[in-house]
Every structure is written in C-alpha cells, then in structure tokens.
Amino acid sequence: MPGFELFGAEEKKEVQDVLDNGVLMRYGFDPMRNGHHKALELEKDLASRMQTKYAQVVSSGTAALTVALSCAGIGAGDEVIMPTFTFVASFEAILSVGAIPILCDIDDTLTLDPEAVQKAISSKTKAIMPVHMCGSMADLKALKSICDTHNLILLEDACQAIGAIYDGKPLGSYGDLGCFSFDYVKTVTCGEGGGIITNSEKYAERAHQYQDHGHDHVGNDRGAETHPFLGYNYRISELNAAVGIAQLRKLDTIVAIQEKNYTFLKNALQSIPEVTYRRVPKTGVESYAFLNIFLPDENLARKAHKALGEHGVDACFYWFDNNWHYYKKWEHLLEQKSLGKLSQEIQMGLQKNNTSFDASDIWMGRTISCLIKVGWTEEQLKERATKMVNAIKSIL
Ligand SMILES: *Cc1c(COP(=O)(O)O)cnc(C)c1O
C-alpha cells in the first residue's frame, strides 16, 4: 500500500518548485509564487481522478473527516454510525464536532453490515460513515438506500482504499462526501495530508471556508474577508501538497502493481481449502492494498498469524488484537477517558457503545490482513508465496 515506496525524482521536482519561491502557504503571496499553487493543483487533479465536481485538500485524513462532518452540518448530540473495525480517527472526528459515534457490527465484507446499521438508527442519527478498510468496500448500495429512507448523510471513509471502484465509480465518490488520507503509510502520501471529494457545490464551498478559519475567500485581501460561519485551521502546506501531486499521478501504476502482487499470492493460497476470502460487494473492485483472508476459526487464525511471523512473512496483521483498529482495545473511548470534561449528552450517548459486538468478533477473530507492497521483486514475491503457504499449512 505505501506510496512512499515510490518516492523519487517526480516528488522532488514538485517540492523544489515550492522551495525555489519560498511560498509555503496556499493562500496569498501571489507575486512571489511563480504561478505555483500546489494545493489548488492537487485539488484539481484529485477531483479529475475521482470524477467528482469538487475536491478539497486538508492537513490529514482525520481533518478531512472532521471537515466533511462539519460541512454536512453535523454537530452537538447528533449520532453518526461507524464500524467496530476502523481506525481511531473515525470516532475522533465525530467527537471533535460534538457528535456521538455509534459503533455498529461489521460483516464478511469487514465493513458496516447494512442490517446492523438499520438496527442502530435512532431519532438522533444524522449520518452513516462506512469505512472501506484494507482496500475493499462496504455494500454502498444498501447503505445508500438506508440513507435515502431516513434522510441521512452517507460519508465514505476511503482512506485505506484509494483507487478502488464501486458501481463503475471511483471509490469515495458514491456517497454525499468521500474522504482520503495521504499520511505516510497510505497508498498515496503527502507525508501528512487528506482530501475530501463531493459533487455538492454547497459542501465544497463550506469545506473550503471551514478548513481556513471560515474565511470566505472573496477578493485578494485576506484581511478584508468576512466569515460566514465559525471555522478552524485544517490547511495543508504547499510542501505537502507538492508531494501529493507527484504521488497521485502514480496511483494507477500503484494499483496495477498491487493487483498483480495480490493475485499472485491469492493464487498460491488457493491450494489451501481452509483459507477463504473477504467478500467484495458485487459491483466492487478492490484497490488490492491488502490481501484479507479468513481462517476457519479464531484459534486457527491466531496460530496462522504466529506461524506467518515465524516463517519470516512480515506485514501480516491480526487486527482483532490491534490497539488502533478494533473496538475491543479502545478503552479510552469506552471508558470515556477525556482530558477535558465531556458534555453530559456525549457521556450518555457513548454509553450505547458499552455492549457486545458478537458478529464483529467472529469475523475479526478469523481475519488476517497481509499488506501488499509495490516494491517486491518477482523473486521476493515467489518466495513470499511459498512461505505463506508453508506457514499456514503447518498449523492445519
Ligand atoms: C489513516 C486513516 C485515517 C486518518 O488519516 P490521517 O491522515 O492519519 O489522519 C482515517 N481513517 C482510516 C480508515 C485510516 O486508515
């Protein structure tokens, strides 16, 4: 998955443009910038690649989610439904706008289970936030239909699946708003950065203003700009955006290499009938960032994960035990450990999450995710496939 594997002359050239004129900020200083507007250029490229009308780049994927929620008017006391398997950024963003993250079971897609979502809806629900974990996606059609029935916002977290496709569209562009992360370990990296895509002019304008303190961006005098609403600073720097321009151009190459490496490893594993695979929705095409496999039960998955490590197969994750990605280890959320005082409304709302998520536990207990790298040589790939097969066969 990591774009940093392909960091080279193209990224350096883009960054050099910024260093040559010294304008590190995206707004103002026009006479000095030699026509370079890196953040703006990255936004144009992102919107074009994702076939959306608008894109806004910001300082991180977490910021992208936060800005997207704010654009959609989500605030105090509103509930946002999110999966038990994701990254901590999901609930951080929801809490940061004063809303309440409501955890919800996943299914064999390793993303939100539409039936569980249906049951989690209350009179306070405002949005559904599917998270397309590890290169594949939620059943967006089913989620969209739930959103349409209940008048909810569909906000896609596509941070781990840039380059995937759903229903013929670039993943992230199906819902009302889609978010990407360009942090250092993502498929496309700016070092730190994030992006929001949408076809809504209203959301796009709000995003542009909100991420820059609510400035209206009218005219050429920053000091004379008015503030239609309260905002914040989630701006990306020109240096980070410059890296992203070169990286985004490599996206299709990265996905093609990932598909080739993923397919090679999957073909090798087909010789083991006990290994099965994550379900990809009918009209979906993965980004192939990870190969996600199921073992028949939790005990075998733990053994297989251990054996993979012992056989020298790196970058295979057993998320069930992971501190960052699975709800069981989010004691700071579940026990409400906040530095400042949480509002009563949030304290009460969060208690809804102190329940069990049995379906999630079953699927995650069985899952091992293997990162797909782009830099492997043919020889390394073959060796890896052999080691993976031997490791898993050794515990069956
Ligand atoms: C990385 C990630 C984020 C947050 O992105 P940052 O740029 O690190 O803030 C959000 N959601 C998911 C699923 C991620 O993997």
Image (spheres, rainbow, N blue to C red):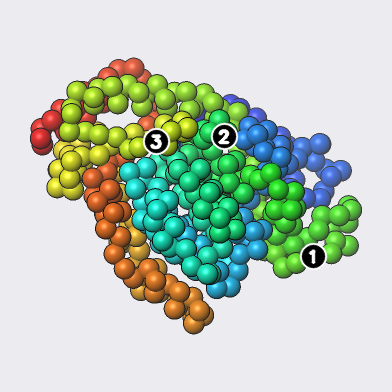
The answer for how far apart the CA atoms under marks 2 and 1 are is 32 Å
Position of residue 345 measured from the top left corner of the image (x, y, whole percent): 50, 79
Q: Amino acid at mark 2?
A: Pro
- Look at the numbered disc 3 and give the secondary structure of its residue: loop
From the image, tell me which residue sits under label 1: 228
- Disc 3, ligand 1: is the CB inside 8 Å? no
Q: Is residue 218 left or right of residue 10?
A: right
- Compared to residue 45, the image places residue 196 above or below, namely below
Q: Quadrant of the N terminus?
A: top left
Q: Residue furthest top?
A: 378
Nearest to viewer (mark 1 / mark 3): 3
Q: Earlier in the sequence, mark 3 or mark 2?
A: 2
In the image shown, does 362 or 124 lie closer to the viewer?
A: 124
Q: Earlier in the sequence, mark 2 or mark 1?
A: 2
Q: Quadrant of the C terminus?
A: top left
- Compared to residue 219, the image places residue 232 above or below, namely below
